Amino acid sequence: MIIWIVILLLFIVSIVAAYFGSRYWHWAHLTLLVLIFMTAVGFFVLAAETLRINAVLRKQVNQLDAQLVQVNTEIEALDRGTSNSQVMNQLAGLEVRIPEDADEIPSIEQLEHELHLVTRLRGQVWRNVMPGAFDPQTGTLEVTIVPPQPAPVEEGQPAPPAPAPVGVAANRILFLFEQGPVSPNDPTEGAQYLGEFRVVESAGPEATLASVNELDEYEQQRLANSRGPWAMYETMPVDQIELFAGLTEEQLNQLLPEASVEEYIRQGSPAGPDDDEWHVVGFDADGNQLGPNDLDQAVKRTYQRRLRDYVTEFSALNRRRVLLLANIAAVTLDNQRLQSALASAKKLEAFRTDEIRKLEIDLAGVKKERSIIEQHLATVEQQLANARQLLDRAIAENRRLADELARRAVPRSGSAPAKGPLAVSR
């Protein structure tokens, strides 16, 4: 502002000088002088502006150089890692997630290596899978892989095209899960594991899956009622100790069922006397983990929950389920046979009962006839006894009469023996 006031004063002085000099100089000389003065002033203004712009730009260049050095330092720290607390604080101010107690940050190469290990361990995952038609008779269902939504862009900028989903190959085994929050108290209300499926046919985002295991009525109903979205895993998620590390007891109670939450809460706590060797880890004085055979030499013993291989456990449960279903089918068949045998036995029982009834009727008739026969026999025996008595009496009487006749037929002395029937009888 001062420079412009000085220039204005010099311009006024030049006009006044030209006015007084017009008395002695030619007007052309005065005009040329004024033009030279104005040109000099213009040059001075342009030079001053150039110096100002140079100073401003140099200051900006210095600032940009300092920022460039800082950005290069941050890039190098992200690329190669660093233990410089000042650089780590700068990165934390740029919303880079760094643990509060971290002494250093790993390099991108190391993080990519760890991510590669985790991704390889986890396998490929397809999310936002929407279910389609489901055939409960064959256990096949159709799914569609919905592409992920692109990142939001600023207003007026063209939206980038959505990335095309990578299709799944045929004959690949996939594990289906429902996306969403779980319900520890009632697993049937939250997101669930849907089962193991094989890719029958695949065409871009569309795929047809078939259940590896035979579905029962409950599983069929669960698949039919699920509206998605689903997540398809190439590999069954692996159980890890670090999976729930750092979560509070309240958070664990919200994620896990009551029957399992205690072992997750006790993870890393001192081992108790009742804990078996499968849940105890020992450490020496230097903090090195000891083997199971050296637990008696451990300075520190901590509780460690048992890791689960869900593929093996689900396979074992499925084999047990198949065995139970086979036993149920066998018992059901045996029950049917027993019911058939019981029906035949009841028919035979009815036949035998009717036969017994008829035999009882015959027995009653036989008993009645026997009673009549016994009465008749008693009468006959009585008559026979009477006849025997009469016969004995008759024989005794005949003997008496015979003796009597014999006495009568004895001849007197000197007389001739009698002749006739009596003599013969004697």
Image (cartoon, rainbow, N blue to C red):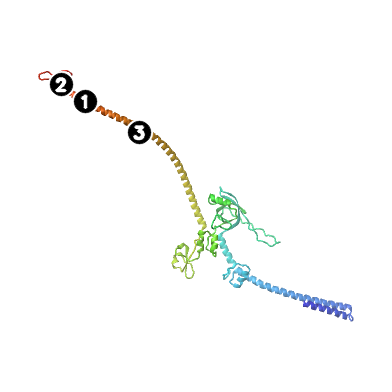
Query: From where the camera sits, is residue 93 visible?
Result: yes
First in sequence: mark 2 or mark 3? 3
Q: Nearer the viewer, residue 347 or 216?
A: 347
If the image is split into quadrants, where does the N terminus sit?
bottom right
- Residue 99 lies, with reference to residue 18, above or below; the image says above
Q: CA distance from mark 2 to mark 3?
A: 59 Å
- Where's the C terminus, which quadrant? top left
Q: For residue 400, what is the image quadrant?
A: top left
Say if residue 308 shows up in the picture.
no
Among numbered discs 3 and 1, the one appearing first in the sequence? 3
| Residue 170 pos. (x, y %) | 58, 53
Dots 3 and 1: beta carbons under 8 Å? no
Residue that label 3 marks: 367
Residue that badge 1 annotates = 395
| Residue at figure coordinates x 61%, y 71% from the top left | 89
Give the quadrant of residue 373: top left
Label for residue 408? 2
Counting other residues with Cα less than 10 Å from the Cα at mark 2, is it few (<14), some (14-19), or many (20 or more)? Answer: few
Cα gap from disc 3 to disc 1, whole angstroms? 40 Å
> Amino acid type of disc 3?
Lys
Crowd class of label 3 (few under 14; some 14 to 19; many from 20; radius 10 Å) = some
Residue 412, given in percent of the width and then of the height, sits at: 11, 20
Q: Residue at x 59, y 66 (%)?
A: 109
* Amino acid bearing label 2: Arg
Q: Secondary structure at mark 3?
A: helix
